[in-house]
Image (cartoon, rainbow, N blue to C red):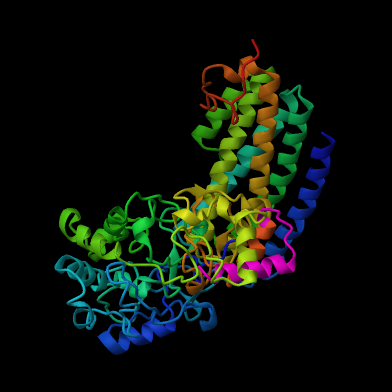
């Protein structure tokens, strides 16, 4: 747990400058970013072959919208976990999520505004379903389901970020994704490790048939059951 | 860390300038893209045009006669030493077909509508000219790693093909490359641009017949078991071989008796050495996963090394594995290993 604290602090430090760099200063596209393989005919160019700033294509918009929804859901679920869980490690993890995602959320909303992407106000139906499902659980069951949902969400977010880095057009959005992706992988690793640990501590719960919330039937790493 | 493609967001085949110039002169076909250029300096790429050795004619040595085989000259060069089936296979391997970046539609990266790309445009004379593209087997785009062209020498001894795909025969590979290397694993785009789908039982078999008679270059110091002949090898080379088989652990995957490969894929777990998730030149640095063991026969002729060409020289390769496998080799040992590899 001490290691978790230290590594959280380090991650926070690592995250802040990266985000600051990608959003505070005027963004000079690094090689490979803002250099799309395909642009619609008639795209405004700042130099031949390079799209003008703040022009978005479908991958950019999909990413910004889903990342906003995802980030908001993360914060909501993390607050729920912070209140409900009786496990210290899970509470630390939840607090970590709240910190990191609040920062990322701010950066993202500024990007969306600069690019003129209308953002959804409400979480979508699937996210509401997950939140409601989790709020009905308690104890180790809640911890395990919450962590399973975290693993799924971070896998999806990593894939979404890779998608926009490869297929996006707006250098700012791509820069944000490139800067944030290492943190997403760190979160994914944290979630998987924590899920393993909590599952080992509660093998009967972990081995139970799939729950309706996450749909994941088993822990990430199979462990022998203690009977 | 992985070496990115020159234009990660598009990917596609990028050819070295010497090949573009030669093909333009011989065939009046342009392989130049308007959006991407080759990045490696010439001294890190193989000799061009590469020599061609046939298993069916070891007495002749290099049958290319110093020329690049093209659709225009292959017949006069090869008729008489190839069977009709092999000659037809060679013709198909030299025939340009539409490709994702070189085609006749509006979605292309060549200035003019292009006749396309031939198999041997990358695999010049059945070797490699260091042209590269991106692995067709991975999505999303940012996660696709760069693929350096592999040499086709010694296909007759290889059981799995493709760095990640593990195709079981060169015929499977030949049949399928039209949808993979040519069209990035996108059969829909392939269909739209006019993919060539060679007939498996007829054309592919013939192309396979031709590829299976391409030999490794001569290695006069090796005996039939893949071991150095002590009467011919120098002291440094023999020392290198001892390391290869022993302390350096190379032979655990690059088995001399089976053409210095083991017909397996291995995961070196390189993600121990770099942070995953960072973006470099548009490519997200991810773990490589299992990759096919590559043959070391004739290895001196095919820089750059590793599946994406990230290692520019043999010395780099030795140092790479020194770090990755934790071998703690000293400088003399590394030099000996390079001396040994030059004999293969």
Residue A118 visible in the displayed image: no
Query: x, y (%) of residue B157?
Result: 37, 56
Res. B321 image quadrant = bottom right
Q: Nearer the viewer, residue B249 or A187?
A: B249
Query: x, y (%) of residue A45?
Result: 48, 77
Q: Is residue A112 above or below residue A76?
A: below
Query: x, y (%) of residue A200?
Result: 68, 22
Residue drawn 75% across and 64% down? Answer: B330
| Lateral position of residue B66 relative to residue A17, left or right | left
Q: Nearer the viewer, residue A198 or B198?
A: B198
Q: Nearer the viewer, residue B253 or A194?
A: B253
Q: Quadrant of the N terminus of chain B?
A: bottom right
Let me know if residue B338 is in the magenta part. yes
- Which stretch is magenta? B324-344
Let me know if residue B250 is in the magenta part. no
| Lateral position of residue B121 relative to residue B73, left or right | right
């Amino acid at each position: 747990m001490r290691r978790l604290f230290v590594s959280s602090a380090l991650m926070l430090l690592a995250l802040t400058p990266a985000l600051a760099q990608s959003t505070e200063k005027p963004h000079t596209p690094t090689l490979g970013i803002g250099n799309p393989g395909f642009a619609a005919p008639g795209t405004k160019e700042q130099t031949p072959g390079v799209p003008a700033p703040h022009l978005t294509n479908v991958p950019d918009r999909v990413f910004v919208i889903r990342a906003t929804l995802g980030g908001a859901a993360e914060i909501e679920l993390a607050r729920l976990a912070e209140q409900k869980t009786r496990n210290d490690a899970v509470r630390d993890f939840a607090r970590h999520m709240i910190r990191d995602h609040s920062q990322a959320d701010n950066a993202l909303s500024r990007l969306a505004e600069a690019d003129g992407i209308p953002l959804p106000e409400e979480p979508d139906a699937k996210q509401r379903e997950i939140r409601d499902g989790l709020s009905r659980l308690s104890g180790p069951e809640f911890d395990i389901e919450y962590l399973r949902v975290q693993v799924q969400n971070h896998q999806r977010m990593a894939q979404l970020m890779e998608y926009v880095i490869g297929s996006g057009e707006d250098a700012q959005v791509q820069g944000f994704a490139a800067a944030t992706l290492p943190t997403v992988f760190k979160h994914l690793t944290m979630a998987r490790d924590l899920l393993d640990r909590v599952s080992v501590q509660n093998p009967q719960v972990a081995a139970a048939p799939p729950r309706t919330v996450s749909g994941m039937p088993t822990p990430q790493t199979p462990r022998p059951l203690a009977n | 860390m992985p070496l990115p493609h020159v234009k990660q967001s598009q990917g596609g085949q990028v050819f070295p300038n010497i090949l573009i110039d030669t093909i333009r002169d011989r065939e009046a076909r342009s392989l130049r893209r308007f959006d991407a250029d080759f990045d490696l300096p010439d001294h890190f790429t193989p000799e061009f045009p590469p020599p061609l050795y046939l298993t069916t004619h070891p007495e002749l040595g290099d049958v290319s006669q110093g020329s690049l085989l093209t659709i225009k000259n292959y017949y006069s060069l090869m008729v008489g030493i190839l069977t009709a089936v092999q000659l037809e296979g060679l013709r198909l391997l030299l025939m340009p077909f539409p490709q994702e970046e070189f085609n006749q539609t509006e979605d292309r990266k060549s200035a003019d509508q292009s006749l396309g790309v031939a198999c041997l445009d990358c695999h010049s004379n059945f070797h490699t000219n260091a042209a590269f593209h991106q692995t067709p087997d991975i999505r999303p785009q940012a996660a696709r790693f760069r693929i350096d062209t592999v040499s086709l020498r010694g296909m007759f001894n290889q059981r799995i093909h493709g760095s990640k795909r593990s195709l079981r025969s060169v015929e499977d590979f030949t049949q399928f490359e039209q949808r993979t290397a040519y069209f990035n694993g996108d059969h829909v785009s392939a269909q739209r641009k006019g993919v060539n789908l060679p007939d498996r039982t007829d054309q592919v078999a013939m192309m396979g017949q031709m590829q299976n008679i391409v030999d490794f270059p001569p290695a006069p110091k090796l005996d039939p078991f893949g071991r150095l002949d002590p009467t011919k090898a120098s002291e440094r080379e023999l020392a290198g071989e001892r390391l290869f088989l022993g302390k350096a652990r190379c032979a655990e995957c690059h088995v001399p008796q089976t053409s210095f490969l083991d017909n397996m894929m291995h995961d070196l777990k390189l993600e121990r050495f770099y942070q995953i998730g960072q973006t470099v030149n548009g490519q997200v640095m991810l773990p490589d996963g299992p990759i096919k063991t590559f043959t070391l026969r004739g290895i001196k002729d095919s820089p750059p090394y590793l599946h994406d060409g990230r290692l520019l020289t043999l010395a780099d390769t030795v140092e790479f594995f020194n770090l990755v496998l934790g071998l703690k080799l000293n400088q003399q040992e590394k030099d000996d290993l390079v001396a040994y590899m030059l004999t293969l």
